[in-house]
Amino acid sequence: MDQNELKKLVGEKSVEWIKDNMTVGLGTGSTVYYMVEALGRRIKDEGLHITGVTTSNRTAKQAQALGIPLKSVDEVEKIDLTIDGADEISADFQGIKGGGAALLFEKIVATNSDKVIWIVDESKLSQQLGSFPLPVEVIPYGSQKLFAKFEAKGLNPSFRKNDQGGLLLTDSDNYIIDLHLGSIDHPHELAEYLIHQVGVVEHGLFLDMVNTVIVGRQNGPEVLEAR
């Protein structure tokens, strides 16, 4: 099976966790795309009643086209379950997210959820975080100063570009600085440092948030539970 087939498998498997009358956080990314498609089919075929809370404009458009009822995070009392992808997951269930530039909304939804499940193909698993560049969302004003600060600290920053070669804008009209670290020995310390830098809106370290990961493997989806 190719990577897309593995993503489709875990996307379809993950909707088994969604029950009637749940409020469900809908993540962003190529694996979540298949989850949202499968959820749309369940709503149509089974009459499943759910309320979706999306983490990006892209997911919102897809969900609306499938007839999935949506509310914003501020309109719901709580989120029962969020299903999202991840760009890298370490052996101790810590993650890097933000490859799709939706990390801010993704983290807001995740931190307001009773349970979070990540769905990935097996290429996203690693022993230690850092091989995937760490996204940091920053406001445009003063972003060059932050970039210089990250550079001086040896964090190997680069501004995320769009397809036209300009600076990519997030759904909140912010920039992304990607940190090319190779390995992250102390993710909690790095997270603490980054969030205290003035001008940083959010970073892509998603720590201590997830106990369940569904992994697409060649012999089928595997459900990993944190000890």
Image (cartoon, rainbow, N blue to C red):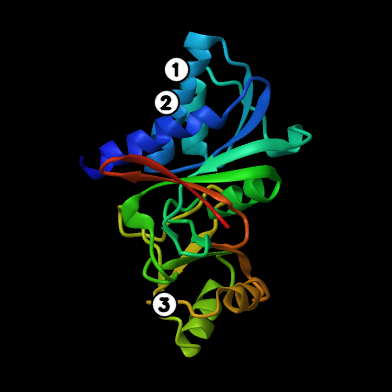
Say which residue label 3 marks. Answer: 183
Residue 66 in view in this figure: no
Q: Is residue 182 left or right of residue 55?
A: left
Q: Which residue, given by chain and number where applicable, does mark 2 sit on?
A: 37
Q: Quadrant of residue 30?
A: top left
| Amino acid beneath label 1 | Arg
Q: Residues within 10 Å of mark 2 (few under 14, many from 20)?
A: some
| SS for dot 1 | helix
Q: Which mark is residue 41?
A: 1
Q: Position of residue 130 (x, y in %)?
A: 42, 72
- Of marks 3 and 2, which one's residue comes earlier in the chain? 2
Amino acid beneath label 2: Glu
Q: Are marks 1 and 2 in contact (CB under 8 Å)?
A: yes
Check the image and name the residue furthest to the right.
77
**Can residue 14 be seen at all in this image of the molecule?**
yes
150 is higher (above) or lower (below) than 51:
below
Label 3 SS: loop
Q: Element under label 2?
A: helix
Kindly report the distance in space between the C-alpha atoms of the residues bearing marks 3 and 2.
34 Å
User: In the rendering, which numbered label is found on residue 79?
Assistant: none
Q: Position of residue 13 (x, y in %)?
A: 43, 32
Mark 1, Cα crowd under 10 Å, few <14 / some 14-19 / many 20+, is some
Question: On screen, 161 above or below 172?
Answer: below
Residue at point 49% right, 11% down? 44
Q: Quadrant of the C terminus?
A: bottom right
Residue 224 image position (x, y, % from top left)? 48, 49
Residue 182 in percent (x, y) is at 37, 77
Residue under the image location 69 percent in, 38 percent down: 73
- Three-letter code, disc 3: Ser
